[in-house]
Image (cartoon, rainbow, N blue to C red):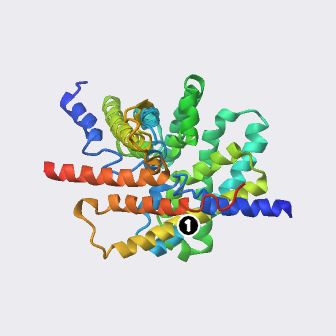
Amino acid sequence: MSIDFKELVQDFANGLWTENPIIRLVIGMCPTLAVTNTASNGLAMGLATSFVLIMSEIVISIIKKLIPANVRIPSYILIIATFVTFTDYFLKAFFPDIAASLSIFIPLIVVNCLILGRQEAFASKNPTHRAIADGLGMGIGFTWVLTLLGIIREVLGMGSVFGLQVLGEWYRPMVIMVLPAGAFITLGILVGIMNQISREGK
Amino acid sequence: MEEFTQILLLFISTVLINNFVLIRFLGICPFLGVSKQVETAFSMGLATTFVMTLTAAATWMINTFILEALNLPFLQYVSFIIVIASLVQFVEMFIKKTSPVLYKALGIFLPLITTNCAIMGLALLIPLNGYSFIASVVFGFGAGVGFTLAIVLMAGLREKLEFGDVPGILKGVPVTLIIAGIMAMAFMGFSGLISM
């Protein structure tokens, strides 16, 4: 079997910008808004989601021929739920602080439409090595937007990045940015800016 | 009487103070996706409320009588998602048989409820908060009403916005998110309405 590297790079790059899950496809919004109040929360959530995404894409692309077509969605959800349980117990054991601050949004990865959507749209139709490239690209695409959102909200809302104070005493934190309302507004403006950038690029 | 007051307070706080969509960030996908028209938004809200109330009852029983009784907490996520998926399927078949008109009106929204994170979130929050059976059902119903309230308000605003002059780059998703932000600010005003 020959591996077409150009195709692999294409699959990988897709998720980073042209088909970025958050800013282009607008899916997986609940965790995007809820856990990005600090940069480290955003990064942790992005990594946890990426892990589940890549692992379930690998498993599903391997066993895709064994799954009968009319029970495929429940089967995908079961596979995803298994990896989510694994991730949740791992975080609770080794990173209890992060697990506590992400609370129910770790188990909610089960119903993240991004993950189920990629299984249906990609992993169930393509060979394993392409599924890995797609999972990596989508995962990194999801993670960088979440981290950026977390950085913006943390700087404006608390004057710090990853817990380090970057803005001096003179800065009066805009508390609204770490509250729910700030999440909606920041993401709205961010998507608007991204639209503008990709429009200029054309 | 005391208990009744508690239940009533729980209901009000679930609908307004801890609104599932605007304060807890659950169910954002349908909130953004199905809020273009007031009518469809209302149908979606009703279907979701119905499934949420049933989910609250079903997952409470499974969690208390099976998972906790047999000490199987690691099966929580897997069993909850199966319960929700089968409940949605059941509701779909039931509505199709009893009211074809309503079935047609809800259309694609019914199966989509399975992946609505508000439902799964509800199932996970109940054992976390340690509610009794009645409190769980009220919590589920209140969450549904809160979801309906948010999505109908949003649809109303978006219908008006169709005629508004929105700057080019903000058209579509961005302006919807910004409106949601302003709505969330308004809902923050409810905090402190009652202290529990």
Picture quadrant of residue A15: top left
Q: Taking B16 as reference, is B85 above or below it? A: above
Q: Which residue is found at the position 43% from the left and 42% from the top? A: A115
Q: Residue A46's image quarter?
A: top left
Screen quadrant of the N terminus of chain A: top left
Q: Is residue A201 left or right of residue A46?
A: left
Relative to residue B151, is residue A127 depicted above or below? above
Mark 1: which secondary structure?
Answer: helix
Q: How many marks?
A: 1
**For the residue marked with disc 1, what is the amino acid?**
Thr
Check the residue under mark 1 and report the chain it is in: B
Instruction: Give x and y (percent) for residue A194.
Output: 26, 49
Q: Which residue is mark 1?
A: B148
The one of B174 and A130 positioned closer to us in this rendering: B174
Residue B85, visible in the rendered structure: no
Left or right placement of residue A169 versus residue A83 in this view: left
Q: Nearer the viewer, residue A115 or B182?
A: B182
**Going 34% across and 34% down the picture, which residue do you hit?**
A140
